[in-house]
Image (tube, rainbow, N blue to C red):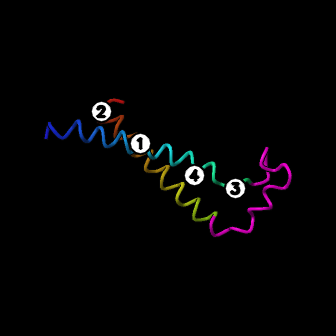
Amino acid sequence: MESLVPAIRIILQVLQILAAIFLIALVLIHSPKGDGIGGIGNAAQIFSSQKGAEAALNKITAYVAGAFYVVSFVLGYYFGY
């Protein structure tokens, strides 16, 4: 069991990095809601017809954020990071 601890730590760290990168990409993919810079030039109206895709994107973002939270908690609790 002792020999598996470094491997588990490395796997969790890789998962955390991948989840962070994927989460950043997902947040950047979200269409603007008409606020801030995204509202300039009616950019929000271009993407407003894709409600189903937006709902799926919200779910995927929530799952990735949850995975990032769990992996971060496990790394912090068991490995002291």
Query: What residue is rendered at 40% in x and 46% in y?
Result: 70
Q: Which quadrant would the C terminus be assigned to in this image?
A: top left
What secondary structure characterizes most of the magenta part? helix
Q: Which residue is mark 4?
A: 26
Q: Nearer the viewer, residue 41 or 68?
A: 41
Helix or strand or loop: what does disc 1 sit on? helix
Residue 57, image x and y in percent?
A: 58, 60
Tag of residue 79: 2
Mark 2 vs mark 4, foreground winner is: 4
Q: Nearer the viewer, residue 80 or 26?
A: 26
How many circles with numbers are drawn on the protein?
4
Mark 3 vs mark 2, foreground winner is: 3
Amino acid at dot 1:
Gln
Q: Earlier in the sequence, mark 3 or mark 4?
A: 4
Q: Earlier in the sequence, mark 4 or mark 1?
A: 1
Asked if residue 38 lies in the magenta stretch, the reply is: yes
Q: Which residue is mark 1?
A: 16
Mark 2 vs mark 1, foreground winner is: 1
Query: What residue is rendered at 24% in x and 40% in y?
Result: 7
Residues at badges 2 and 1 in contact (C-beta under 8 Å)?
no
Q: Which residue is mark 3?
A: 31
Residues at badges 4 and 1 in contact (C-beta under 8 Å)?
no
Q: CA distance from mark 2 to mark 1?
A: 14 Å
Taking 28 as reference, is 2 left or right?
left
Residues in magenta? 33-53
